[in-house]
Image: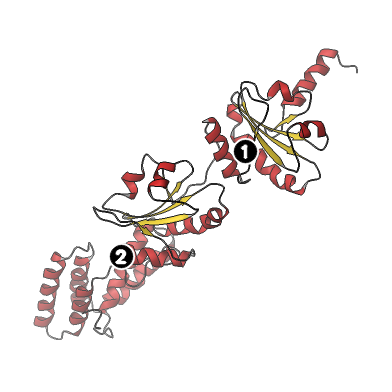
Amino acid sequence: MKLSFLTILLLLIVSCFASENNVLDLTPTNFDQLVGKDKFALVEFFAPWCGHCKKLAPVYEQLADSFSHAKDQVIIAKVDADNHKDLGNRFGVGGYPTLKWFNKGVIDNPDEYDKGRDLESLISFVEEKTGVRSRVKKPTSSVTELTSRNFDEIALDPKKNALVEFYAPWCGHCKNLAPTYEKVAQDYAQESDCIVANMDATKNEPVAKRYDVRGFPTIKFFPKGENKTTIDYQGGRTEQDFIYFLNKNCGTHRLVGGGLSEEAGRVPELDALAVKFTNAITQKEIDLVIAETKDAAEKSDSKFALYYVKVMEKIKDKNNYVDNEIARLDKIIKSGTISASKIDDFTIRKNILTNFHKNKVITHQDL
């Protein structure tokens, strides 16, 4: 079956513009028709045999897909510069892959892209150059994202502690830190006054300059208080290192993985009274300790202070209350059916209950 001239022409046009992953294939025939006109263009000059090009290909395709809704504003394209050497030579391509950025109405002297070749860096670059937002689906993060608009409201909140990482999308060390930093943020997700945040310093230069950020990543701690004095984070970059620092500076008791330590929720003065209660013999002694504990609990800032009193009153009715209640709470925690906030709540209750064991002794720390 013979195809008409019009059909052949249409097929050629479609082959030039269509791409399985929204990456436009450019050749000497259509290059000047598409680039340097009324659209921005990021063009990859590649060679089919190039290993680095093959590695970049799936990322580059994702980049094109994420801007497929804005084809009337920005082109994500590629040129087989091994097959079209004249086109590569025209733009000074000396190796593969080479990425060039063409502004609207400009085809001579394009800018060479020299930043990271991961998806996040490429998207950030195109968004910054064009003002067009990508439609890539970013995974949900526990890290609070700061910008020039919300920085003072969050990081400088006198009622909050904030750990802030200033990063650059193209920074290799920042990328290596990201998974660990995300875990730390997850570990502190239940701590409302201990914020783990980050800021793209390349997009928010005025704030970065205000805090003398000169390299990436730079990590600073903003403690609670009306007159915040920043602390440069100088510790290691493991999950445990960050947790040690935050527990020390935020007064928290988190563990690697987000759990709570055995000290969480306990009040030293009330711990001592719990031990005093278990050592009481007569009913009069028991009642006096309960009254003393009520008085101390009402003066305490801890929301769990009155739980000490509740446990004492329960023990009066059931001698085996402590062991049974610890077992019950432990079973619920391990069931996986309750929220993270409930796990914290029940863990703290278990911590307090352990102070009522008969073999518990008063230490200098308790006193």
Amino acid type for the residue under numbered disc 2: Gly
Amino acid type for the residue under numbered disc 1: Leu
Q: Is residue 297 left or right of residue 354?
A: left
Contact, CB < 8 Å: mark 2 with mark 1?
no
Q: Would you identify the image quadrant in which residue 229 lies?
A: bottom left
Q: Residue at x 22, y 81 (%)?
A: 275
| Mark 2 Cα shell of 10 Å, populated few (<14), some (14-19), many (≥20) | few
**Residue 209, horizontal then vertical, whole percent:** 41, 46
Task: Assign the N terminus to one quadrant of the image.
Answer: top right
Given residues 229 and 225, the one toward you in this image is: 229
Q: Residue at x 31, y 67 (%)?
A: 348
In this view, which residue lies farthest toward the right?
1
Tell me if I can see residue 341 in this picture: yes
**Residue 112, horizontal then vertical, whole percent:** 65, 38
Please tell me whether mark 1 sits on a helix, a strand or a loop: helix
Please tell me whether mark 2 sits on a helix, a strand or a loop: loop
Instruction: Report which residue position mark 2 lands on.
Output: 251
Tell me if I can see residue 259 in this picture: no
Instruction: Report which residue position mark 1 lands on.
Output: 63
| Mark 1 Cα shell of 10 Å, populated few (<14), some (14-19), many (≥20) | many
